[in-house]
Amino acid sequence: MDPEVPGARSLRSGALAVTLLVALIALALVSAGSGQLHVPPLEVLGSIMHRLGLDIGPMPSHANGESALWNIRFPRVAMALVIGAALAAAGLLMQAIFGNPLAEPGVVGVSGGAALGASATIVFGWAFLGEWTVAVTAFVGGLAATLIVYAMSRANGRTEVITLVLTGIAVNAVTGAGLAFLTFLGDTAAREQIVFWQLGSLNGSRWQQFGIVLPLVLVGLVVAFVVAKQLDLLSLGEKSARHLGVNVEGLRILVILVVALLVGASVAFAGIIAFVGLVIPHLMRMIIGPAHLPLLVVSTLGGAVLLLGADLVARTAVPLADLPIGMLTSLVGGPFFFWLLRRTRGSSGGWG
């Protein structure tokens, strides 16, 4: 084997991570300053520096600029960063444990399960854990959906593509019916919130919500990084992984819990945002290869960039309107899914 290949891959991974990080910072500054009240990126940066106690850069020149940034824009930008990273990581983890390139939280119904749990909290007025109640019920719903998908689509140690897709259709149908029933039971305010969950949006994000989502996502990402090497061994096959000391079933259960945690935290306050976990890991894998540790780094950065860009378009594409962000990600991810499905079918020699 060419000894330069691993070094070249490491170099490519590092260059991609730096590029994504620079793009993330630039996009965050532009996104925070965009809207009805325009704040130039330098003034956005100056506002952040002054809050950090550094006398660098100009402060917002508009009288309401500082308030708009810290009370409305920054919470939304922060939520986009964290949720984009969480969804991309969840997609990567699902593809690793299913051994299937089409596994994605939105496609196979995990996001729908989480939305069902969150919507039930709204309709029935549950508040047994205060502001954490929605996140916890979304986690339970996402976990139940993940376990169902795992149990239904796995057979003889493998997941067939067609079985996974059909299982996703069935789970999405059941969660869709549950959401419709909750919409029927709820009052007008509950119905509006359920519609919000189904479309996906970061409108109305608050620091309190970010304070709930951030620790959950951090826990999930830390565990994901810890098991990344074991996922590399799992990709060699179950028997090989066991011979190399991997507790395969224990690893799968742990990853399922992490996926449910990441998706539940994301859906709890932003609704169903599909295809981030499908598009980003694939694009990154095409660039840097299949090793999970570097793939996880660039996928989390890529997911944050994608969702931040989609949110910027959602806020600015139509004047005085806020488009559903889930609609935008589906516009990109839907055709990508078709291409991936056709490519996978071709490599499998057909499913007929």
Image (spheres, grey):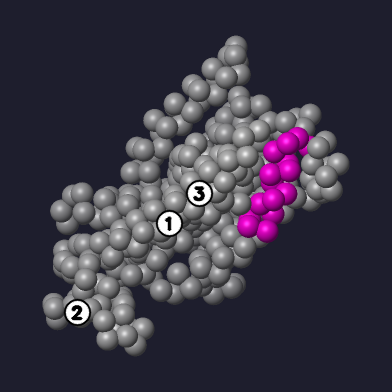
Quarter that holds the C terminus: top right
78 falls in the magenta region:
no
Mark nearest the camera among 1 and 2 is 1
Q: Residues within 10 Å of mark 1 (few under 14, many from 20)?
A: some
Which residue has dot 1 on it?
18
Range of residues picked out in magenta: 224-238
Q: Quadrant of residue 26 in the image?
A: bottom left
Q: Amino acid at mark 3?
A: Leu
Which residue has dot 3 on it?
11
Q: Picture coordinates of residue 322 (x, y %)?
A: 25, 54
Mark nearest the camera among 3 and 1 is 3
Q: Which residue is at the front of the view, 29 or 177? A: 29
User: Which residue lies at the image location 25% right of the left edge and 61% below the top edge?
Assistant: 30
Q: Is residue 113 left or right of residue 59?
A: right
Q: Picture coordinates of residue 237 (x, y %)?
A: 75, 35
* Marker disc for residue 209: none
Which residue has dot 2 on it?
58
